[in-house]
Amino acid sequence: MRPLRLYLVQRVTAAIMVPLVFLHLALILYAVQGGLSAQEILSRTQGSVFWGGIYGLFVLCASFHVSIGLTNILQEWTPLKRIAAANIAHTFAFVVMLLGFRAVYAVVF
Amino acid sequence: MTTIHKVSIWRGGADGSYAHYEVPARESQTVLDVVTYVQRHLDPTLTYRFACRVGMCGSCAMTVNGVPRWTCRTHVSKVTGGGELKIGPLSNMPIIKDLACDMTEFFEKWQKAQSRFVPTKTRKDPMERIRPDTPARVAANAGIECINCGVCYAACDTVAWNQDYLGPAALNRAWTLANDERDGGWAERLKAISEHGGCHSCRSHQSCEAHCPNQLNPASSIAGLKRLSTSAYLKGELK
Amino acid sequence: MLKPHRKPLWYAAMVHRLSGLALSIFLPFHFLVLGLAIEGEAELDNFLKWTESPLVKFAEMGLVFLLTVHLLGGMRLLVLENFAWRDDQKTIATFAAGASVLAAFAFLFQVV
C-alpha cells in the first residue's frame, strides 16, 4: 500500500481515537472508584447500542492504527523487509481486532 | 587551565578504530584546528575534509563527542569541558578513510527526490517579479540556505533505520521548491517525495532541526510536504 | 558510530513509539480479559478480584501513564503535521509528560 495512504489511515484513526481515549481514561478513573466489579461494568454495557458502537469503533480504529505503527517499528528496528514486516503486523492487528470485537460482544450481549 | 588536549580520532575505514593524540591547547581553538595540528605535526596520513574554515561551506562536518557539527565553528572548550575530545566521520554514510565519508548516497537521494529547480521561462522572457513577503516566498526563504553539508542527514535516526529514506536535506529542498512560484517540476516531485522513503517516513524526532548549523528546520519543511501531499491526494492529484 | 546527543523532542518521539508498542502488546490481554464476560459475570469478577493486589494496581497505573503519554504525544504529532510550526514544542512535550504522570497518579489515588 502506498505510504501516503498508510500515513493517512494512521493519522485519521488517531484523530478519531483522540476523543475516544479521553472518554476511556475518564471512564476508568470514574469506574475504579470503590473497586471494580463485573456487575458495575456489565450493568452499564449490556444491551447498550451506544457503548457497543463507541467501543466497536475504538477497536476498529485501534486495529488499523496498531497495524501501521507496528509495521513501521518492524521495518525500522528489525532486519525484516517491508513486505514481511507488513504481513506480521497486519496479522497481529487482525487478531487484535477479532479479540476486540469479541470483547465488545462479551460486554454488550 | 588545560595545556594539553587528549584527542581520539577515528582512523581507518568501517573496521578502523580510535587513535589517541595529545594536542597543545590554544586560545579560541576549534576542533578543525585540532585535526589540522594532528595532520601537520603528529601524523601526516590523517585524512579529513575542509575548505573555507570560516563556517560557510560545510565541508568540515564531522562527529564531535557524539554530535555532528562543523568543526571549524566548534570551539574545543565548548564541547570538552576539560575532558576528552572524540572526533569521527559523519554517521549514516560509508567511511572512506579516517574522517572522510562517502556522500554519494546523500546526493543521489537528492536527485531521487527531484529536489532540483525546473525552469519554466527562458532568458528571452521578461524577468519574473517575485514578492519577498508572500507566505510562500517566506516559507521558501526559510529553507534555502542549505549548503548540503550532511549534518542533518548524519543526525537523522530515520536515515539510519530506513535505507530508502530520502533524508531531511533533500526533503527540505523539495519544500522550498514547492513554495517557489517559478518552479515547474512540482507534479513529478510530489510523486517522488510520496514514495516509500519519502516525507511520510519522517518520525518527527527533529534531530535535523536541532543540529543544522545554518539553523534551518527540515522537520518543519517535511511537515509542510506531508500537508501538501495530503491535500493533493484528497483533490485526486496524487494516487 | 557515535550517536548524536538526544534532545527533548527526540525523547518525546521515542516515548511515543515505545508506549505505542507496549500498549499494542497489552491490547490482546485486555480484550481476552473482557471476553471472560462471555462465560458470565462471575468469570469476569474472579479475574477482577485478582487485580485488587497492589502490584497489579501499580501495573495498571503504568498502563494509564502509557495511554496518556501516547495520546498526548500523538496529539503533538497531529498538530505539528497539520498546523503551522510551533517553536514551543519542547514546552508542550514536557507538559504532556507531566500531565501523563498526573493521570497515572490520579488513577492510583482512585484505587488506593
Image: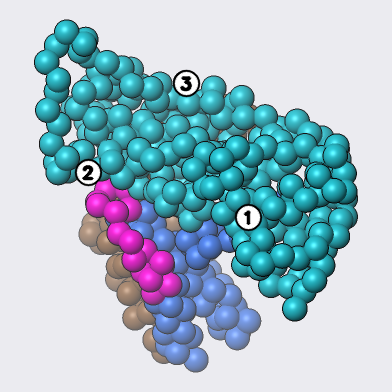
Chain colours: A brown, B cyan, C blue
Using residue B17 as the reference point, say whether residue A101 is left or right of it: left
The residue depicted at 56 percent of the width and 40 percent of the height is B52
Whether residue B193 is situated above or below residue C94 in the rendered picture: above
Residue indicated by mark 2? B138
Q: Which chain is disc 2 placed on?
A: B
Vertical order, C34 against B165 (above or below): below
Nearest to the observer: residue B61 or residue A5: B61
Counting labels gives 3
Q: Is label 1 in a helix, a strand or a loop?
A: strand
**Spot occupied by residue B27 in the image (x, y as percentages of width and height):** 67, 67
- Image mark for residue B67: 1
Q: Which residue is mark 3?
A: B111
Is residue C106 visible in the rendered image? The answer is yes
Percent x, y for residue B32?
Answer: 67, 50
**SS at mark 2?**
helix
**What type is the residue that disc 2 sits on?**
Val
Q: Are marks 3 and 1 in contact (CB under 8 Å)?
A: no
Return the x and y of residue B206 as percentages of the image width and height. Answer: 46, 52
